[in-house]
Image: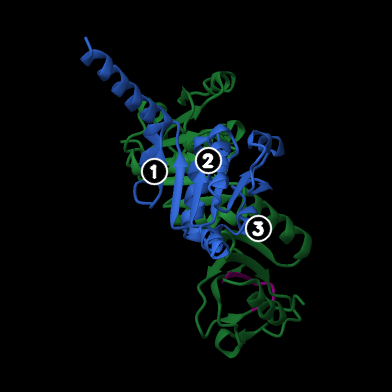
Amino acid sequence: MKKFKNREKESDYSIIIGCGRLGASIADNLSEKGRSVMVVDKNSEAFKRLSFGYGGLTFNGDASEIYVLNEINVEKAKSVVVATNNDNTNILIAQLIKERYNVPRVIARLYEPEKACVYEDADIMTLCPAVLSANEIKKLLNIDTVEP
Amino acid sequence: MKKRVFLIGGFSKAKALAASLIKKGYGVTVINKEPDESKMLAEAERLNVYCGDGTVPIVLENANIYGADIVIALTRNDDDNLVICQLCKKRFKVKKTVALVSDPKKVDFFYRMGIDSVVCAISAISAIIEQQAVMDEMQTLVSIGAGQIKISQIPVSPSAPAADKKLSELGFPNNVVIGCIMRGDRVVVPRGETRIHAGDILMIISADQKDIQGIKEITGNE
């Protein structure tokens, strides 16, 4: 029974592009939950950020190259998280993956919220750390002002 | 009113292109993120220079790019060029966007992302080199649309099977069109009854290099 469950999880294959702090921590989380996951980074040193217990795959290559995307079988992924440290690279990779491989869920990290408009018609989710932190801080400040 | 053209990134390319466009009467602005390069560019007459990162929306806005006629993205990075053109198209309502791409495999993708014109330097240059190296008699003049359509000139040799024959008598390949015939200083518009003479130069529009083979045979270039 347990074996069957595992196999079911395996069909939910995720790819994380960019093994920075964000990429590595998402990959670690997914791997801990027993999901099948692959992290891609063009710098093999980056994989040192993964925890000791990381059980997923790693791939050393530049994901903005089409042959790399073919090699890691992007089309088989249910979700792809694009989290390199360059907004423009993220935009290119996310659109390339959505357009050429039709992955159901593509999530991209974007430092500059003003650039989100290029994703307008594409079915790509964007996360902006500055906006998220601002919202959290607003909440904290509100609580502080309510107290006295 | 002057047409407004923006060149983003690419120092030497921007310099050469700006000079040529200014001569043709366009209002040209260059956006470059290196202060040193911007200073050097600013030495040119009638050229507006804006120093900043052209992939950042606020920079484009301050450079007054809204509603520009043409934006040409010339940076070294494909991703930067894609973002520049998409921002210009979607946010700043630029009428025409042109992007330089270094990876020939991404040309299609750039077109599908809504960029009006995609130029791949590598495929253009390799096509020229290949043609210089392989072709001798025949010369390709222009390649359009990533090299799928070619305009070439091909001379008719005295021993050619086609010499002194009417065009309608020749079995021309289907996918080849003779645009015009150059005879000395004259230009002859080809019709079915036009006779081809030795020494004529045929201007040929073709879709595939294979189709030209047939032409080479009847003009005696084989």
Q: Residues within 10 Å of mark 2 (few under 14, many from 20)?
A: some
- Residue A92, horizontal then vertical, whole percent: 51, 46
Mark 1 vs mark 3, foreground winner is 3
Q: Say whether residue B162 is left or right of residue B1.
A: right
Distance (Cα) linking label 3 and label 2 = 22 Å
Q: Nearer the viewer, residue A19 or B201?
A: A19
- Residue B184, horizontal then vertical, whole percent: 62, 66
**Disc on the earlier residue, 3 or 2:** 2
Disc 3 sits on a residue from what chain? A
Q: Say whether residue B55 is left or right of residue B138.
A: left
Q: Which residue is mark 2?
A: A26
Q: Which residue is mark 3?
A: A71
Q: Which chain is blue?
A: A
**Disc on the earlier residue, 1 or 3:** 3
Q: Please tell me whether mark 1 sits on a helix, a strand or a loop.
A: helix
**Start-end of magenta stretch:** B197-206
Distance (Cα) linking label 1 and label 3 = 27 Å
Instruction: From the image, give the main secondary structure of the stretch colored magenta.
Output: strand
Query: Any mark on residue A118, and which?
Result: 1
Mark 1 vs mark 2, foreground winner is 2
Q: Which chain is green?
A: B
Q: Residues within 10 Å of mark 3 (few under 14, many from 20)?
A: few
Q: Amino acid at mark 2?
A: Ile
- Residue A102, horizontal then vertical, whole percent: 47, 60
Q: Is residue B180 above or below residue B6?
A: below
